[in-house]
């Protein structure tokens, strides 16, 4: 079967636009919105979090929708809902109107066009080369923040946050509609095609300990990544970097995500998917520490490298590890569960940091909590059956076999005599 480069490219363009227009760009728009409106920081952060929560909760039905009818239906819904919601938000003078529009618009992009949809579609498009399809898709997706963060920073300085958001979401809607028209999905008679067999009991897969630990680890990592993505520019500017430099660094961090994706096949082959997930989560935790002190260019560049690798590797590894744990017939729904937990935790991250900042007047406690969450993610995805490692030792090295060997040795002289 020929590798579907065109389909993977279309899915990559969807990923770039869907992540960039709101999820990444919001960090650049955050302070300009506060300066223009005077709304409370915690309320604005909560809006982003509630949009992420809506997207996370809708990830499971969106994944099942993709399993059943294909990605094009999800993309068309995302185009309509995101355009409507975010245009309403840009026209709002009252916070409640802004919040409703932003939650619907941002949440629909996350629920209907994020990796749980595009990776499942990529696996079905290239069932014999699933890891290659996921890796290539996420390499394309790595350009999302590299494109949209500097673009948002440039636009917001000349056009204001309202026009900037309108431009970004309009471009995204155009990409979604184009992909829905042009994408090619399997329609044969095998189990890889859309709607072939969607198991109603996909939740049974989460009874295995490895799957449950993966859910917990994804949730803790999501908390850290969500907080970092919203506060990456504010933390750097608060530490002393100009907003233009901070936005450029945030964009460079997005470009650096490629460093976590290009060598991924080698890393997974060497240490396995689970250990690779742990490695990525460890880089996420360390990058939060660097971000807190990124008041000069050198430390900011170190943060770019660490966060780029950690976040960059996390996205494809979630798909690769999920492809090992779950049946492909309901891969979209299973990944939807992982995305839901990851997304809800990502939503909680900036909300908690914002509340702590409002209550204490500092963001340091929130940063510390984010680091703890990252370390917890590494521990959570540990070996679900560590005792099984003993079975990998040769039988000749076990205590019982050693004693038996000694006993046979002592008896052997008498048998010779």
Image (cartoon, helix red, strand yellow):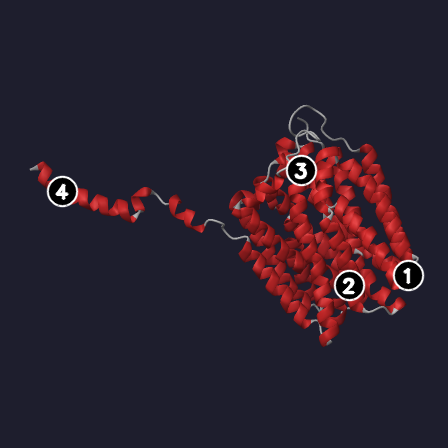
Contact flag, marks 4 and 3 (Cβ < 8 Å):
no
Q: Earlier in the sequence, mark 4 or mark 3?
A: 3
Disc 4 versus disc 3: distance between alpha carbons?
A: 61 Å
Kindly identify which residue carries mark 4.
411
Q: Name the disc covering residue 45, or none.
A: 2
Q: Given this view, does label 2 or label 4 mark the residue nearer the observer?
A: 2
Taking depth in this image into account, of 5 and 175 the one nearest to the observer is: 175
Contact flag, marks 2 and 4 (Cβ < 8 Å):
no
Looking at the rendered structure, the secondary structure element under dot 3 is helix
Q: Earlier in the sequence, mark 4 or mark 1?
A: 1
Is 349 placed left or right of 208 in the picture?
Answer: right
Kindly identify which residue carries mark 3.
133
How packed mark 1 is, by other alpha carbons closer than 10 Å (few <14, some 14-19, many 20 or more), is some
Q: Earlier in the sequence, mark 2 or mark 4?
A: 2
Disc 2 versus disc 4: distance between alpha carbons?
A: 77 Å
Looking at the rendered image, the quarter that the N terminus falls into is: top right
Q: Earlier in the sequence, mark 1 or mark 3?
A: 3
């Amino acid at each position: 079967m020929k590798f579907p480069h065109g389909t993977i490219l279309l899915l990559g363009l969807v990923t770039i636009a869907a992540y960039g227009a709101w999820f990444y760009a919001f960090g650049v728009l955050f302070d300009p919105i506060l300066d223009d409106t005077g709304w409370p920081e915690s309320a604005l952060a909560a809006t982003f979090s509630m949009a992420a929560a809506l997207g996370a909760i809708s990830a499971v039905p969106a994944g099942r929708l993709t399993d059943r009818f294909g990605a094009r239906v999800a993309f068309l819904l995302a185009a309509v809902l995101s355009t409507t919601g975010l245009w309403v938000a840009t026209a709002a003078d009252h916070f409640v109107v802004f919040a409703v529009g932003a939650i619907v618009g941002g949440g629909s992009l996350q629920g209907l066009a994020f990796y749980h949809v595009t990776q499942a579609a990529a696996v079905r498009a290239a069932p014999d080369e699933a890891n290659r399809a996921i890796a290539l898709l996420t390499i394309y997706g790595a350009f999302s923040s590299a494109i949209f963060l500097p673009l948002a920073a440039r636009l917001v300085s000349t056009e204001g946050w309202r026009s900037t958001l309108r431009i970004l979401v309009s471009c995204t809607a155009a990409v979604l509609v184009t992909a829905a028209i042009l994408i090619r999905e399997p329609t044969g008679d095998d189990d890889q095609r859309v709607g072939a067999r969607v198991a109603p009991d996909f939740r049974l897969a989460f009874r295995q300990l490895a799957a449950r630990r993966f859910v917990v680890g994804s949730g803790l990592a999501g908390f850290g990544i969500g907080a970092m993505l919203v506060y990456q520019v504010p933390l750097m500017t608060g530490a002393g970097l100009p907003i233009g430099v901070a936005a450029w660094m945030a964009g460079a961090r997005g470009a650096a995500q490629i460093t976590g994706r290009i060598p991924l096949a080698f890393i997974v082959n060497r240490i396995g998917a689970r250990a690779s997930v742990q490695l990525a989560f460890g880089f996420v935790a360390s990058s939060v520490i660097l971000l807190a002190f990124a008041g000069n260019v050198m430390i900011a560049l170190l943060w770019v490298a660490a966060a780029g690798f950690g976040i960059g590797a996390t996205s494809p590894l979630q798909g690769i590890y999920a492809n090992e744990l779950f049946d492909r017939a309901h891969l979209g729904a299973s990944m939807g569960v992982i995305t839901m937990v990851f997304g809800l935790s990502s939503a909680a991250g900036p909300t908690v940091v914002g509340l702590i900042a409002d209550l204490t007047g500092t963001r340091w406690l929130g940063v510390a909590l984010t680091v703890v969450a990252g370390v917890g993610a590494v521990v959570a995805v540990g070996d679900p059956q560590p005792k099984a490692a003993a079975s990998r030792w040769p039988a000749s090295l076990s205590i019982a076999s050693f004693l038996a060997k000694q006993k046979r040795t002592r008896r052997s002289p008498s048998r010779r005599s």
